[in-house]
Image (cartoon, helix red, strand yellow):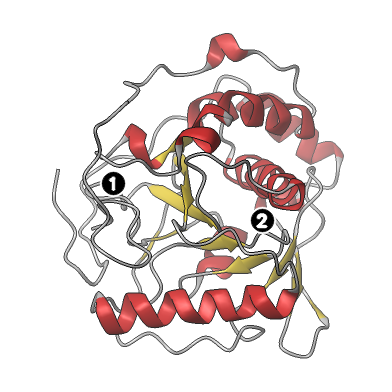
Amino acid sequence: MTRLPRNGACCPDRQPAPPPDDADQLLSRRRLLGGAAALGGALVTGAAGLALPGAAAAAVQQPRLHDRAAWRARRPTHAIDVLDRAPDRIVVHHTATANAKDLSVAHAYDLSRTIQGWHMDNNDWWDIGQQLTISRGGHVMEGRSRTLSAIRTGRHVVGAHVADENSHTIGIENEGLYTKRTPTDELLASLVETMAWLCDTYLLDPYQAIVGHRDYNATECPGEVLYDMLPELRDRVAAAMGQRPDPKRTVRRPHRDGPFPPSRGRFDHGPAV
């Protein structure tokens, strides 16, 4: 598989996965609700704190999203790649930073700006690497440029968060270090809501789509505690989508127990490009 350059651009070399077995049921449910749910409309908060117009309501309750203008993101240095197809995996990460006690939205905005600055100035990337970021206060923020517009139209913004796999994966960075500690209830609730929204929008089976960074690369990310919570989180996402939890549908992947390569510095949670 083609390795992505450091800036996060790519030439796609992977075909999208076929829809899950229950895709027809999801489509039927959307038609009953008005048919517009495939666009995955969300309540998006802009810089002024106002709800921005989006697509019609989806079948799944959607998270409150803070767009790039809200946290005053820098412009990317190059055009961001948007593929005319959906991702087939949702990759859960942790930021490998301190487990902050500040749960405010102001802290969440500062977190996004700090990560973007590190990715662009230290990693020499075109923009922040991940598509979405969730703070310990449960605030969900748009990451890489054009992410929200791509999700609404069923397309995929290529990020920089999983080495060799960015052309088909959407990444969610969760603030904190979860090697021994458990994420806050606020973060977990928003993570479930966000993944249910993505699965519903992209017609993904949560038991197949939701994975951890270590399922692809040699890294501790998203931390032993959060990684071990993924089966429970898949069940919660399925329930949020109106499905009966069925862990037997989970795709088995090699569980990497370590030893893991040491972190190379701030915000380093393993191979990303």
Please give the label number shown on residue 227.
Answer: none
Which residue position is annotated with label 1?
Answer: 165
Cα distance in 3D space between marks 1 and 2: 24 Å
Residue found at x 31% / y 50%: 162
N-terminal-most mark, 1 or 2: 2
Callout 2 amino acid: Leu
Q: Nearer the viewer, mark 1 or mark 2?
A: 1
Residue found at x 65% / y 73%: 108
Which residue position is annotated with label 2?
Answer: 39
Q: Say which element carries label 1.
A: loop
Callout 1 amino acid: Glu
* Residue that sits furthest to the top in the current view: 248
Q: Position of residue 63 (x, y in %)?
A: 75, 56
Q: Position of residue 121 (x, y in %)?
A: 29, 84
Q: Position of residue 227 (x, y in %)?
A: 49, 33
* Category of crowding for the residue at label 1, using alpha-carbon neighbours closer than 10 angstroms: few (below 14), some (14–19), many (at least 20): many
* Category of crowding for the residue at label 2, using alpha-carbon neighbours closer than 10 angstroms: few (below 14), some (14–19), many (at least 20): many
Quadrant of the drawing holding the C terminus: bottom left
Q: Say which element carries label 2.
A: helix
Of the pair 93 and 160, the residue shown nearer to us: 93
